[in-house]
Amino acid sequence: MSQDINNKNEWPLWEVFIRSKAGLDHKHAGSLHAADADMALENARDVYTRRMEGVSIWVVESRHIRASDPGQSESLYEPANDKIYRHPTFYNLPDEVKYM
Amino acid sequence: MVQSFQEHFDSLIDREVTIEPKDWMPEDYRKTLIRQISQHAHSEVIGMLPEGNWISRAPTLRRKAVLLAKVQDEAGHGLYLYSAAETLGVSRDTLYDQLHSGKAKYSSIFNYPTLTWADMGAIGWLVDGAAIMNQVPLCRTSYGPYARAMVRVCKEESFHQRQGFEIMLTLSKGTGVQKKLAQDAFNRWWWPSLMMFGPPDAESPHTEQSVRWRIKRMTNDELRQKFIDVTVEQAKVLGLYVPDKDLKWNEERGHYDFGTINWDEFREVVKGNGPCNRQRLETRKKAWDEGQWVRDAAMAHAAKRKARKQEAANAA
């Protein structure tokens, strides 16, 4: 998302996602520069997992990420506000009903 | 409800909501952050040099492994911070240019020489100690990527201070000569460490606005006092003397009073006239220039591999 033009010779920017242990999701850890995907993985290993922070790494070039616009938060997320019937607590059931 | 961008931004700050890269922000907020985060990143990178000086001469294999790990961490911290700065729309190359041309500053502490092995202890204990004091409140700074980088840095930094204190402890419990080395390093690093917190609040041009924006959570003087109060107690454990004849516990304030800091020296070092300013920048520029062919070769290699893959795909 760099608007700076002084980066013609830079290695591309990559976003790094790390699974901290088996069974958990990959989570965004940060970013780094690398010439290609293999180097991005190796650099991510050195930069973001020096203390056993991960068991799996994903890298993706930053320019491939499309991010939502915070200015549109209202139109994107507000419609969910009046749909409380999507939550289980919306429904009143008698106390004697178990396991539901 | 019509709100200006500015009002919206102010209300986020007031409600302690974190600002993220795609949020609208005032141009000065962006500039202040770029300046502060990149200065911080440059400090991590230049900060490797005084310690790098002792890697090959560490007294034992254990000390060498530890020092190597610490210096590698500092490279990592620089990278976290450069990445955070880049989310504000400035390129890595621009940031490097600013460092290499002398336009951007880094912490003045790294312009002092590391004369003996004891300096590795004093740096870990005092310089990293002061850095942690500075950095812990920054974990709650208002800009998300900066705050997240600081959380990671702080987690790693505590080993840095502990290993430094351990070196000082070993020396101060050692032979007479070793204890002397420890005291001498303490004498040389104490005052520059106090300067790390920056000029007094009254003379700090950016403090007020930065506190308003929650970029800074505590002022220079508050942090300095806190550092002195905890470090003086630690010096007692080492059995070393704090090199300040005016240092005295003030019952009323509940803090230590301390002597006058030599701000003329600070300003000279910031201006570029410290003992090692020129050497540090030259070393850094040399490393960057001599690495150019590696960076170029990596790009050429990546392009070649991509083309080969494309060819194979076309042939199939």
Image (cartoon, rainbow, N blue to C red):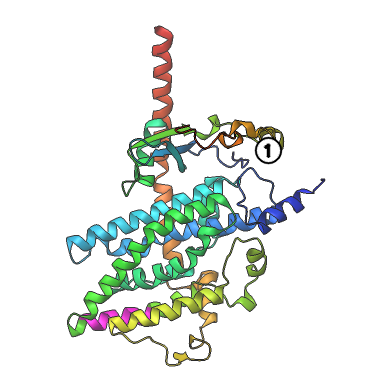
Quarter of image, res B297: top left
Q: Position of residue B169 (x, y in %)?
A: 25, 76
Residue A26, position in %: x, y?
42, 36
- Front position in the image: B98 or B5: B5
| B218 sits to left or right of B27 | left
Q: Badge 1, how many Cα within 10 Å: few under 14, some, many 20+?
A: few
Residue at 36% over, 70% down: B123
Residue type of the residue flagged with mark 1: Ser
Indicate whether B293 appears above or below B149.
above
Residue found at x 41% / y 78% = B230
Q: Nearer the viewer, residue A35 or B277?
A: A35
Magenta region includes residue B187: yes
Q: Is residue A51 above or below residue A61?
A: below
Q: Can you say which quadrant of the picture contains the N terminus of chain B?
A: top right
Q: Residue at x 76, y 48 (%)?
A: B5
Give residue B89's quadrant in the image. top right
For disc 1, the chain is: A
Q: Is residue B101 left or right of residue B212?
A: left
Q: Residue at x 55, y 37 (%)?
A: A8
Q: Is residue A40 magenta?
A: no
The percent position of residue B94, horizontal first and vertical second, equals 56, 48
- Residue lying furthest right in this view? B2
Residue range corresponding to the magenta coloring: B178-188
Q: Is residue B301 visible?
A: yes
Quarter of the image where the C terminus of chain B is located? top left
- The residue under label 1 is A73
Magenta span: predominant SS is: helix
Q: Nearer the viewer, residue B263 or B88?
A: B88
